Image (cartoon, grey):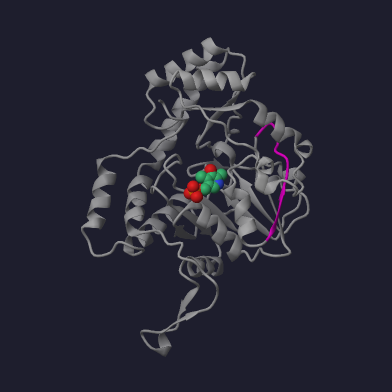
Amino acid sequence: MIPYGRQTVDASDIAAVVRVLEGDWLTQGPHVEEFEQALAAYTGARHAVAFASGTAALHAAVLAAELGPGSRVVTSPLSFVASANCARYAGAEVRFADIDSDTLNLDPRRVPECDGIVAVHYAGLPTDLRNLAHRPRVVIEDAAHALGSETPDGRVGNCARSDMCVFSFHPVKTITTAEGGAVTASSPELADRLRRIRHHGIGSRPERGGWYYEIESLGFNYRMSDIHAALGTSQLRRAEEFVARRNHLAGRYREALAGLSLRLPPPAPTGWRHAYHLFAVRVPGRRRVFDALRAAGIGVQVHYIPIYRHRLYVGRASDPALFPGTEAAYEDLLSLPLYPRLTEREQDFVVETLASVL
Ligand SMILES: *Cc1c(COP(=O)(O)O)cnc(C)c1O
C-alpha cells in the first residue's frame, strides 16, 4: 500500500537517537532544550516549548491563555478533533465557523464573537490572520500541518499575528519525533506558563533550599523525552529539504491532474509558501473513487469528517446545515499520497489509476 503520508527517517536520525540511549539522560533534558532552540530558530519564534504530543501542546496553549469555563473558542470544523477538544479539556465552549471554500480554512472574515480562536492551517496553507473580522483576546494557530509554511509575515510559528502557534511531530507531519508537539510564543510569561503546565505545575524556589519546589497550579506530565527530541533536532535539519520535495511533488500532481474532472487544492498565493502536508483534491463520486484507489493499493484518505458530525459534538450548535462550505468539502475531498520519499514512479501510478477511475 502506498500510504497518504509517512515519515522520512535516515541513518543520521537513527544515530542521533542511539547516542541519547547510550547516555545518562532519557527523559526531558538537554536534548529537549536543544530541540526547542532549533525550532525557535527555524520558525523565527522567541520561545518554543516542546510537548509529548501536538494534542498536549494544544491543551497547554489553551490553559496558558486562560481560556476555560465561561469562554467561547471558535475553530475550523474541517480539522482533526484535537483542534476542538483542546478547548473542551479546559472547560471552554467550542463553536465552529464555516470554512472558506477557496482556502478550506476557517473564514477569518466570518469569525463570530468569541474569546479565542484556534486557527487551523489546513493542509499547510496558512489561514490569513490579517483578515480577522475582529481580534479575539486569544489567537492560537494549530499549525500541525504547517511547519515550513510562510506568509508575507514570515514563517509560520513566529507568532506575528497570534499569541501561540502549535505544531505536531506525528510521523505524517513535516518532521517527526514519533509522538511530539510544541508551542511557540512571543511572550516570556506565556512560555513560563507553558513550561509549568508541562511539568506538574511545579515552580522552583531555590531560596528555600535546593530540594524545594512548589506546586503553584494544576499541571500535567506533558514532557517530551530526550530520545524524541534528539530525533526532532536531527529531522529539523532536513525540514527545508522535506518541504521543497513536497512542493516539487505537489507541482507534478498539478501538472499531471490538470486535464481531469477534479478540483485541485488551493495553491499558495504569491509571496506565501505551502508546506503541503496534504494534497487534497476534490472528486465527484468520492466514495467510488476512494474504494477503487484503495483496491489498487493506494492509501488515499479523507481529511476530515467535520468535527461537528462526531457524536461528541452533536447538539452543540452542530447542525450541518450551518456549515454549507464544510459540508460541500466533506462530500468530495480526497487526500492523495504525498511525502518526501514518494517516488515519481509511485506518483505516476497514483495519477494513472485516478485518471482511469475517473
Ligand atoms: C496531527 C494533528 C493534531 C494532533 O497532533 P498529535 O501530535 O497527533 O497529538 C492536531 N491538529 C491537527 C490539525 C493535526 O493534523
Magenta segment includes 102: yes
- Whether residue 288 can be seen here: yes
Asked where in the image residue 28 lies, by quadrant, the reply is: bottom left
Percent from the top left, x then y, of residue 305?
Answer: 62, 36
Q: In this view, does 235 lie to the left or right of 330?
A: left
Q: Residue at x 68, y 60 (%)?
A: 92
Give the residue drawn at x 46%, y 41%.
Answer: 173
Q: Is residue 101 above or below residue 31?
A: above
Residue 299: x and y in percent read 46, 27
Q: Is residue 321 above or below residue 131?
A: above
Report the quarter where the C terminus lies.
top right
Work out which residue is located at the far left of the displayed protein and give it.
Answer: 22
Q: Nearer the viewer, residue 5 or 11?
A: 5
Percent across and percent down for residue 98 are 73, 40
- 276 vs 37, left or right, is right
Query: Does 326 appear in magenta?
Result: no
- Read off the magenta span: 92-103
- For the stretch drawn in magenta, what is the main secondary structure? loop
Taking the spot 58% from the left edge, 47% from the top edge, the residue there is: 153
